[in-house]
Amino acid sequence: MGNKIPTDNAERSRRLITETLLIQRRYPFMHTRIIGDRVTCRGTMQTTDTGAEYRIEVVYKPWTTPKVH
């Protein structure tokens, strides 16, 4: 059959929670929240120890490409 995008709300909720936990584990500097049907992550990062700080926001909706600002 192949992979298909789940349509039931329980699977979508499990995916949001799983993705949030994985993001928190891998990127502890990001503040994550589940808002509706997407995960929003905000934080600051530096490219080097003396480089400028950048505020970033990643909005992820399961089964779509994340949007980065």
Image (cartoon, helix red, strand yellow):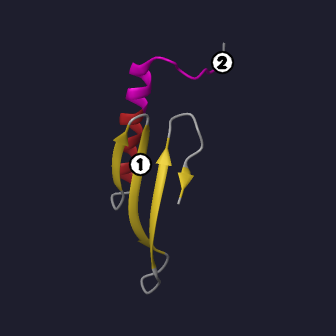
| Residue occupying the point 46% across, 58% down | 57
Whether residue 7 appears in magenta in the rendering, the answer is yes
Q: Which residue is mark 2?
A: 2
Question: Residue 41, position in %: x, y?
Answer: 40, 53
Instruction: Check residue 58 for magenta coloring.
Output: no
Q: Which mark is residue 69?
A: none
| Dot 1: element | strand
- The residue segment tinted magenta is 2-15
Image position, residue 47 (x, y; %): 49, 76
Check disc 1 and give the amino acid type: Thr
Earlier sequence position, callout 2 versus callout 1 = 2
Residue matched to label 1: 40
- Which residue occupies the extreme top position in the image? 1
SS label for mark 2: loop
Instruction: Kindly check if marks 2 and 1 are in contact, taking CB atoms under 8 A apart as contact.
Output: no
Would you place residue 19 above or below residue 10 in this image?
A: below
Residue at (46, 82) in percent of width and height: 52
The Cα–Cα distance between marks 2 and 1, rounded to whole angstroms, is 29 Å
Amino acid on which the number 2 mark rests in the picture: Gly
Q: Residue at x 62, y 21 (%)?
A: 3
Q: On the picture, is 44 further left or further right than 69?
A: left
Task: Farthest residue to the front: give it.
Answer: 36
Task: Give above or below for 62 relative to 66.
Answer: above
Question: Residue 55: where, in percent of width, then height?
Answer: 43, 68
In percent of width and height, residue 12 lies at 44, 26
